[in-house]
Image (cartoon, rainbow, N blue to C red):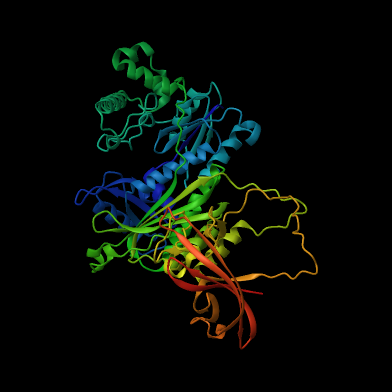
Amino acid sequence: MPFAAIYVPDFPVEAMVRAEPELRERAVAVVEGAPPLVHVVAVNETAAQAGVEPGMTKLQAESMVDGRFTGEGSRATPATIRQRSAEREAAAHAALLDCACGFSPRVEDTAADTVVLDVAGLERIFGPPAKLAREIARRCSELGLEANVALASNVDAAVLAARGFAGVTVIAEEKEAERLGELSVEVLLDSKWSVARGQWPANALGGERAPSFSKTSTREGALRQAQGRLCATSALEILETLERWGVRNLRALAALPEVAVAERLGQEGLRLQKLARGQARRPLVVAEPPLRFEEAAELEYPVDLMEPLAFLLNRMLEQLCARLAARALATNEIKLRLELESERDCGTAELRNCGIEDNAESNSAIPQFGNSTIHQRSLRLAVPMLDARVFLKLLQLDLQAHPPPAPVTKIWLQAEPAEPRRAQNGLFVPQAPEAEKLSVTLARMERVVGRSTVPSTALGAGSVRRSTADGRSPGIGGQERRVGSPEILDTHRPDGFRMRKFVVPSTVDRRPSTPTPHSESSPITALRVFRPPLAAVVTMRDGRPAQLASPDRPAMRGDVVWCAGPWRSSGEWWTEEVWSRAEWDVAVRNEEGVVLYRIFRDEIGERWLVEGSYD
């Protein structure tokens, strides 16, 4: 069985149910169009039993569903009518491709609701064809899509079987005509793809897939689309002719004489007859689906509380993680975009101007789409992970620190794919904390301590302006990261470093550390650095410090009984971050006794600062 077809019946409804699993047991109808021309385009089985059919108006569908399923009695079932969503259908189609690519690299993107994959050789991994088909159906169900799966020896026979038979179907070789014979001729051209919507099957299951109107702008594309329209129209006319002849199923169509079919229906009729016999042979048109993992949710009512927003984010994160797992991938970056309620709806004229400060992670609130505002957040993870609960906690902590300034009306969530982290620790290497727990711990620490806003004038000559996590200098009032990994800068400036986002190293340095030789008799001193340096008032006498006082620490006031220096240094005079300083080591006698300090004079800012104390 070299080919398997996956078909999702009532695809617009399944895209809705995938985003809202609670609709699975309800009567659901999907409508589209602008009022008053809103009509039903797809229904699920429960709504079809109530009499709702595609083509009805929204009012007709509501009246029929309400009269049958929402009245008094034991069969009372909530009825739901949803507006068609292009974002949800695109995400559902991407999930369908992810499921197929999880089994085979050779996948054909046949239609929005149909994909075909080459399964030759997979029986060595999954066992017999029936077991393989059940496994494919199970993977689709895990991604939120209830699909029909069919295996056959050729592409078109597999597609017809998937569209005609519910559940799992396996057609043995040379048995295609026998199994397909009981299907209705309507399966040759799926009636859900209408001329009015500009969507077509893959050339009536036998040719090149025609492009849609929305994606075609060139002359060549328009000509190809016209050819697809003519092909579908011809197939519709043939099916109407077969209906008048009394040909109801594929067995009757396959039994017709080929010469008579060619004389009356032409080459298109012969092609449809080959499809009915399961004899159509064509190569698999292998697609290369992009590795784009994005989910979107458009809310019926604006959400302004964290709890319902977290509930929606949790569902979307689980869907993204399932899609990534189907491709054997993880993610190291989560991007969140929230469309906020417009100023006209929420009754204030200040929402369009409300934003958040850029934190070197491309997080901002950007006015877009007329009166709407986009609140954008981006989380970079320490290591690639695949845990929806960890992602949800990180997003909650981030949104609590940077809440959206208005109620949310639409959500976009995107995961950047990355190779999963593979680590093998040595027997004698200390065990590091789990990456998932470490990311949450860092996020909680950053929420507690925040991002320091340190003016450049308070950093001293040793660090006139430090760079932010992405290498940019924050300038006066800029932001610095307080939680992360320190990185030494390529400079002679004392204490020249910056805090970067913490990243777990891929390898562990197993080289033995060489201890620093020192004499047991010599004392060891350590400098306890003050960050930022403390402002000081130094009284000079004969060019040497005589008294020291700090307005930040009154206990530091005292006379200098010993000093050494000055040690002068300067650098980066060719940039805006020029620095120059003169350092002194002083011993100050105060109430606590004699304390050693390192002080320096900022020659650029013409001020004294205390850099630290010696232990």
In the picture as drawn, the residue positioned furthest to the top comes out as 259
Q: Which residue is drawn at the image coordinates 29% and 49% (left, top)?
A: 31
In the picture as drawn, the residue positioned furthest to the right comes out as 520
- Residue 61 percent coordinates (x, y): 28, 52
Q: Nearer the viewer, residue 294 or 212?
A: 294
Q: Is residue 154 visible?
A: yes
Q: Is residue 197 left or right of residue 313?
A: left
Q: Is residue 298 left or right of residue 311?
A: left
Q: Is residue 539 left or right of residue 575?
A: right
- Residue 586 percent coordinates (x, y): 60, 76
- Residue 60 percent coordinates (x, y): 25, 52
- 31 is higher (above) or lower (below) than 291: below
Q: Nearer the viewer, residue 452 or 101?
A: 452
The quarter of the picture where the N terminus appears is: top right
User: Residue 290 is drawn in which quadrant?
Assistant: top left
In the picture as drawn, the residue positioned furthest to the front comes out as 542
Q: Nearer the viewer, residue 143 or 549?
A: 549
The quarter of the picture where the C terminus appears is: bottom right
- 213 is higher (above) or lower (below) than 283: below
Q: Which residue is drawn at the image coordinates 44% and 26% (left, top)?
A: 285
Q: Which residue is drawn at the image coordinates 46% and 33% (left, top)?
A: 288
User: Residue 109 is drawn in which quadrant?
Assistant: top left
In the picture as drawn, the residue positioned furthest to the bottom comes out as 591
The number of numbered discs placed on residues in the rendered structure image is: 0
- Residue 402 percent coordinates (x, y): 41, 66
Q: Is residue 43 visible?
A: no
